[in-house]
Image: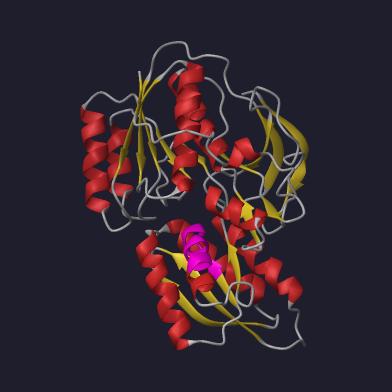
């Protein structure tokens, strides 16, 4: 494994600063600062900070199936870019399927089953449900096919590897950012919180992290609304919340929530009066921060998560050492570093369009 450990272990609850991630990378995307969990598959496990470097090339043209919950927002476009570009760089085949949304668990399962029946050598899954794919994972692993958990998280103990971060920490970082501005003892500040689709592992973790960060501060979460990350759904949730709570001072939630809120608040003359924050990063959030419309967002470098998952699958297929549970180090982007952070690790390349196969 070309993963060089560069610092001591740290406790899982510690907010780890990114090592050099704000520097522009060279032509190669690696080495990239990551965290490695050990024991694997437990987000509470101790972590070590490391630099991740992938294989130079695959030994053969492996056939890798990738399943996403949807391709409705730019976050998944960034992960898509990562898996596509890394598959091309390594010289493996990649087929991507997407289920169309977080309500379509049965569709995701059938798509993966079709992928496996079609001859997939490995499967990478961005799961719709934390627990709902466990029987499928067991079935696929029973055929000797590696399964990598990417971004969203699954509870199956039979996974081969995870390429993801702690979304609890993503939520914590968002909550921490506003809690520092409004510490305990100050005037109560009303916040509406939109964590995402109910039942998704990343959403439950993000919600727990956010609530933990704001506890004991002057932040009062007056509304928590769950919903699919389609723009229409999130826009309706924000509209309903503004009607019920016209005195809210912050809208905080998914990137889609933040993007939808910009237009809605502008149309009502509230942009700037009601502040907006996302707990993950997309091109729309990037533009919003640059324009002063969105306060900040932590980034989990989704392009890198896609790249690492393809490399993990290839390493497993070739019986090479690999990091079993790894994710990019997290950091917050705001007006202070929006013009200097490593854009290529968080956003798809300019002009990239959704790509469903690499041959």
Considering the whole magenta stretch, tell me its main secondary structure. helix
Q: Report the side of 139 relative to 74 (left or right).
A: left
Question: To which quarter of the image does residue 186 belong?
Answer: bottom right
| Residue at x 62% of width, y 43% of height | 38
Taking the view exactly as shown, the residue that stands out farthest to the top is: 59
Q: Is residue 228 in sight in this rendering?
A: no
293 shown above or below 34: below
Quarter of the image with the N terminus is top right
Question: To which quarter of the image does residue 215 belong?
Answer: bottom right
Q: Is residue 311 in sight in this rendering?
A: yes
| Residue at x 68% of width, y 88% of height | 188
Residue in the foreground of this view, choosing between 145 and 227: 227
174 shown above or below 323: below
224 shown above or below 335: below
| Residue at x 47% of width, y 81% of height | 242
Query: Residue 281's x, y, as percent?
Result: 57, 52
Question: To which quarter of the image does residue 335 belong?
Answer: bottom right
The boundaries of the magenta stretch are 252-263
Q: Report the side of 312 relative to 133 (left or right).
A: right
223 shown above or below 127: below
Query: Residue 126's x, y, as percent?
Result: 40, 45
Query: Residue 76's x, y, as percent?
Result: 44, 44
């Amino acid at each position: 494994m070309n993963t060089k450990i560069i610092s001591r272990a740290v406790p899982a609850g510690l907010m780890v600063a990114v090592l050099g991630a704000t520097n522009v990378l060279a032509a190669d995307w690696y080495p990239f600062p990551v965290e490695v969990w050990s024991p694997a598959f437990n987000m509470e496990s101790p972590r070590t900070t490391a630099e991740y470097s992938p294989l130079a090339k695959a030994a053969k043209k492996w056939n890798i199936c990738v399943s996403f919950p949807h391709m409705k927002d730019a976050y998944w476009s960034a992960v898509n870019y990562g898996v596509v570009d890394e598959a091309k760089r390594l010289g493996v085949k990649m087929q991507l399927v997407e289920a169309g949304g977080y309500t379509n668990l049965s569709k995701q399962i059938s798509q993966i089953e079709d992928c496996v029946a079609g001859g997939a050598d490995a499967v990478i899954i961005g799961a719709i449900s934390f627990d709902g794919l466990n029987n499928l994972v067991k079935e696929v692993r029973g055929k000797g096919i590696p399964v990598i958990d990417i971004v969203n998280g699954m509870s199956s103990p039979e996974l081969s590897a995870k390429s993801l971060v702690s979304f609890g920490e993503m939520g914590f970082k968002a909550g921490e950012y506003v809690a520092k501005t409004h510490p305990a003892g100050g005037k109560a500040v009303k916040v509406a919180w939109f964590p995402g689709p109910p039942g998704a592992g990343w959403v439950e973790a993000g919600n727990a992290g956010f609530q933990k960060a704001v506890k004991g501060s002057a932040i009062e979460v007056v509304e928590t609304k769950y919903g699919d990350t389609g723009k229409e759904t999130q826009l309706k949730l924000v509209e309903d919340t503004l009607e019920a709570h016209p005195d809210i001072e912050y809208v905080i939630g998914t990137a889609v929530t933040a993007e939808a809120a910009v237009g809605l608040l502008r149309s009502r003359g509230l942009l700037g009066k009601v502040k907006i924050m996302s707990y993950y990063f997309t091109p729309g959030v990037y533009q919003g921060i640059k324009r002063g419309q969105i306060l900040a967002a932590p980034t989990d470098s989704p392009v890198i998560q896609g790249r690492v998952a393809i490399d993990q699958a290839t390493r497993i297929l070739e019986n090479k050492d690999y990091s079993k549970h790894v994710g990019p180090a997290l950091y917050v982007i705001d007006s202070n570093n929006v013009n200097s952070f490593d854009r290529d690790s968080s956003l798809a390349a300019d002009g990239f369009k959704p790509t469903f196969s690499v041959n």
